[in-house]
């Protein structure tokens, strides 16, 4: 089972991130990813104005830095919002990041959800149905640009006309991921288009159900579900108070999926996700980064699960 680290970009410096990425690789983790936000995920917004949580580093630049700072790990994104960048812009960026990493880049896409960011920057925030149709078109455009000499696409939202993305990635097929848990549309899009699917902070029983829905969508489109890599973002914490320090008001929502207890208890919990259908888990970290806890995880838990 692949064990990775997912690094939030809020309330931290680039030096802190670079140190964390290097250290995570040295500890033996196989995957490191970044998220895509302009504000902190738990930003406080009142009357349309942000009160706290505006400190957040930009994702594409951080993804490129991750590629340059590491030598072995897969360099992922979980996930870029399709509404923030035209898919051609993102395709060109990820192709360059793949060169910077010498062929270790993965790209994740999602429909987006953090409306205050959209509103603050004047980016349209349509209904979930529209955003999911944008995601459907966006991942197709990225795939075409990364794999075809010229790309043509005529959609509701995006158009490509003899569009080029050169140089192509180092990888013949750069892995594209879809993030999200919507059973009717998101998981169907993963079955149709994605090399990987990621979900955040689900308990094992709920995750197992989502895997079953994904597999049914694969059957509907005639796809072998084993060709889709499946992962889940979890976090580790000493207790609820520790979780609240990093995740604020969402701590109680994700408490059921948090990795807590002894090394064996954490390993047993990870085994539940493996049995539920996960190919990998990513330890989700937010500042202030608890490097000592990550060290303990690597020393005590990794040998039990890899």
Image: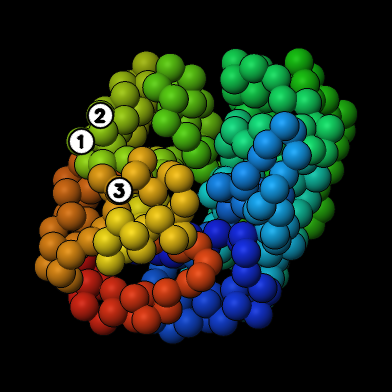
Asked whether the beta carbons under mark 3 and mark 2 sit within 8 Å of each other, the answer is no
Residue 227, how many percent across, how many down? 38, 41
In primary-sequence order, the first of circles 3 and 2 is 2
The disc at residue 205 is: 1
> Which disc, if any, is residue 144?
none
**Which image quarter: residue 69?**
bottom right
Give the SS element for disc 2: helix
Most foreground residue, 221 or 275: 275
Q: Vertically, is 231 above or below 243? A: above
Question: Which residue is at 18% across, 65% downward?
Answer: 261
Q: Residue at x 20, y 36 (%)?
A: 205
Q: Earlier in the sequence, mark 1 or mark 3?
A: 1
Tag nearer the camera, 1 or 3: 3
Marks 2 and 1: CB-CB under 8 Å? yes
SS at circle 3: helix
Q: Position of residue 154 (x, y in %)?
A: 79, 19
């Amino acid at each position: 089972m692949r064990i990775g680290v997912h690094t939030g970009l809020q309330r931290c410096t680039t030096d802190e991130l670079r140190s964390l990425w290097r250290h995570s690789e040295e500890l033996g983790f196989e995957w490191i990813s970044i998220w895509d936000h302009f504000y902190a995920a738990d930003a406080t917004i009142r009357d349309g104005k942000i009160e706290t949580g505006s400190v957040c580093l930009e994702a594409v630049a951080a993804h490129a830095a991750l590629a340059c700072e590491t030598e072995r790990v897969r360099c992922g994104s979980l996930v870029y919002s399709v509404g923030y960048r035209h898919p051609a812009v993102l395709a060109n960026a990820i192709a360059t990041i793949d060169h910077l990493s010498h062929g270790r880049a993965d790209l994740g896409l999602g429909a987006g959800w953090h409306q205050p960011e959209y509103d603050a920057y004047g980016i349209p925030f349509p209904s979930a149905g529209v955003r999911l149709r944008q995601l459907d078109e966006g991942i197709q455009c990225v795939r075409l640009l990364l794999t075809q000499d010229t790309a043509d696409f005529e959609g509701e939202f995006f158009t490509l006309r003899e569009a080029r993305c050169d140089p192509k990635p180092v990888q013949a097929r750069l892995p594209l991921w879809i993030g999200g848990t919507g059973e009717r549309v998101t998981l169907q899009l993963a079955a149709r288009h994605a090399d990987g699917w990621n979900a955040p902070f689900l308990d094992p029983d709920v995750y197992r159900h989502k895997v079953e829905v994904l597999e049914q969508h694969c059957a509907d489109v005639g796809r072998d579900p084993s060709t889709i890599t499946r992962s889940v973002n979890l976090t580790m914490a000493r207790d609820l108070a520790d979780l609240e320090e990093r995740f604020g008001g969402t701590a109680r929502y994700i408490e059921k999926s948090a990795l807590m207890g002894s090394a064996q208890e954490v390993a047993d919990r990870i085994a539940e996700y493996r049995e539920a259908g996960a190919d990998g888990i990513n330890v989700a970290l937010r500042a202030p980064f608890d490097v000592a806890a990550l060290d303990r995880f690597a020393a005590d838990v990794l040998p039990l699960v890899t």
